[in-house]
Amino acid sequence: MDERTLLFLAISLTLLAVLANSLEQKQSQESNLGAFQYDWPVGDPRRCQEQSRLSKLDVNRFEVIPGVGWDNLRNVEAGLVISYNFTQCKVTDDGNFLIPDNVFTVPIKHSRVERFAELIDNWNSATSITSKSVNVAAGSIFSISGHYSSEHEELKSKQIEENVATIRVQLRYPRYEAKLQPDSEFSPQFKSRLLSIAVMIELNQTRQAEYEAQLLVRDFGTHVLSSVTAGAALVKDDYVRTDKMSSFRESKTAYLAAASASFFNQFKLTSSYNSSYTDQQKESYSKATTYSILKSYGGPLFDLESMNLSAWTQGVDKNLVPMDRTGDPLNYLVKPQLLPELPYSTVDALEKVVRRSIEMYYEMNTYRGCTKIGDPNFSYVANVDDGSCGAKAANLPFGGVYQTCSVYGSTLRQNPCDDLQHVNPKTGSYSCPSNYSAILIQTFYKRGIIEFDKVCRGCGFLWLSTCCDNRQYESTAEYSAYWCAATSPVPPNSGYLFGGFYRPTQDNPLTGSTNCPPTFYPRIILTDVTLCLSDDFEQSIRVAIPFGGFFSCKSGNPLAVYLLNFTNELQSNMSQNIDGSTSYPMRCPDGYSQHLATIDSGCSINFCAKTGSMTKTPLPPIRRPPFMPKPDAIYNYEEKYVFNPQTLVWMKNEKATYYEETNNITVNAINDANSKTLKGSSAVTKYTVTVTFSSMLVAVTLL
């Protein structure tokens, strides 16, 4: 072998060695990089995606998943209620998407694109494009579900202001239905909030528990989504003048066909739509349409100029969005299976306070009245029809309001009744004018601030020393609100005119602000409701609202059973056995609609105003929780509570300590890996609350 051949072999071997070393280093770097990317904790979805990548599979996370909180009034997602985990690295049945362990999907295995048109001639009959099921399932009690969504408010305002009806044409392409497994584990944040409310319930801090439950609804919504349909849709809303619809002789069928044809023509789908739709109808429909909105939900960005339906449907799976949602109220989740740390009685009380907070959220945003456009009693803000369309309202006299208050217990410097007692300016006392009767609205209780005072005295030998003790003052205020109803004939222009009401967080519908109209003056009732009254009939009659009385959750309205005869003398048709406010019907007189003034201690207070008279402002913004001021501090001394699950009895202070000592049980002893501990600063006091829940003992210690 010559030298040239040997040199060539040597160079070749050297190059091979260099290449082999380079390849080894590259593989080592890739291995290290892969190990770094794979270093995600078990349960993290990125760990599952890395496993798929190493297996040369392309799996994306499924984004349309249930378990999220849902505000069913605004149709928006809220805080995370259910905890997600990806320890099993589950995928959809077709292997395209990664899903959490507690979620399963049902693929919709058909290629049919759903197409339909609907006429919406009243906004109350409109349903959400992406949240229909969860809104409808709420039932008649929650009939305003979805009414504060941007979609609904836009439709309502356009229909009223422009006197139009809406024709909606949809093309929907559902692909998957994701469902939540029953009894899935709570998210840590949601569960912590529930346990915090449970602590307040067991400490008998009722108002603090109500306040925190309202914050829970504010942050996590009214419902939890249990099922979500994923897909995409194309939607077109045409606003058609109602006075032009009469030109369609075939009525509803004709303009639905016209709307469908217009929609399909715009998306170049004429060949797939058959109709006897004529050119004349096309021209008439086009002239009657004042406004059109074209919306795309999910799927690729639709380009009217270059894209057809086939290209759009092929790209849907890459951009899935929720097309429908179902869910349950949050209080449905408050059950022993999901809160094993709590005794059954506490779970039951917790469920009730959460349910009341959801109901209060709905009630605070319900406006009753006539919803028929064109009716003399039509109410612009009403979202629930109360049957008052066409009813005639009689002018019923109003004799003012007053509020009494009594203190139970002892006080030092602060009397809880100072801001809770108000005289009737008509009489200057806690009474009604002649020919008016006092009607109880409701009686409430307010706990005063605990006060302390140092009391010193002589003590010791010959009383030469001074001994001091801290004396505690604790009180409760009982306050009762009354209004004055004319239960017999009264002179003309007597009593008061009513000019609306307002609260610190709610504007007066007549002024759009927290004040009274000119010539009206404010009078406070309950804790924070300000009524606007005037006895200047000459100046105030033009802006006054006919007033029809009060009623509450426990007290009725006597004016609901009164009638005016033809000589304008007030006559009673009440039966002889009606002798108190609790016996009167809890409703408004004919021609009047109820309006929520406030909710105090869980009791709704309503007043009645002439139907359609409270509509001088635009659509009101949604009222969001909380609906009560933050409760004052109650406790500033040490207390201990222990729950014995064997006897189902709570023990306090000395008995709790004795139980711990005799059973050799301490909070630290049971605070092991199997117990659940909640620690945090109380929202109403400056002490620390430590709560330990276990299968054997529940201890609450205030430090």
Image: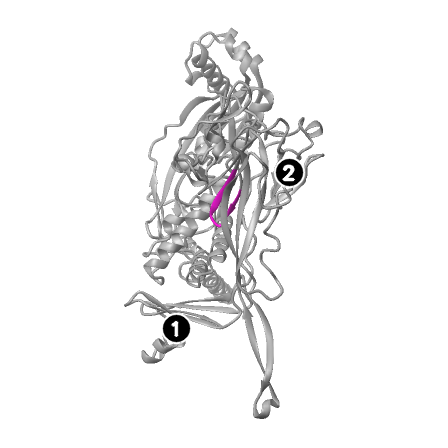
Say whether residue 350 is left or right of residue 687: left
Position of 616 relative to 6 (above/below): above
For the stretch drawn in magenta, what is the main secondary structure?
strand
**What is the number of the mark on residue 671?**
1
Q: What amino acid is labelled 2 in the image? A: Cys
Q: How many marks can you see?
A: 2
Q: What amino acid is labelled 1 in the image? A: Asn
Position of 677 relative to 92 (above/below): below
Q: Which residues are magenta?
A: 598-606
Image point 59% across, 89% down: which residue? 463
Q: Position of residue 387 (x, y in %)?
A: 46, 25
Task: For the N terminus, give its image quadrant.
Answer: bottom left
Name the one closer to the observer, 409 or 126. Answer: 409
Position of 149 relative to 155 (above/below): below
In terms of secondary structure, where does tag 1 sit? Answer: loop
In terms of secondary structure, where does tag 2 sit? Answer: strand
Image point 63% across, 37% down: which residue? 508
Task: Tell me, yes or no, if residue 333 can be seen here.
Answer: yes
Q: Position of residue 211 (x, y in %)?
A: 50, 54
Residue 600 magenta: yes
Q: Position of residue 575 (x, y in %)?
A: 40, 31
Badge 2 local density, few (<14 within 10 Å), some, or many (20+)?
A: many
**What is the number of the mark on residue 532?**
2
Residue 99 magenta: no
Image point 56% across, 63% down: which residue? 449
Task: Tell me, yes or no, if residue 312 can be seen here.
Answer: no
Badge 1 local density, few (<14 within 10 Å), some, or many (20+)?
A: some
Going from the N terminus, do you reach mark 1 or mark 2 first?
A: 2
Q: Given this view, does label 1 or label 2 mark the residue nearer the observer?
A: 2
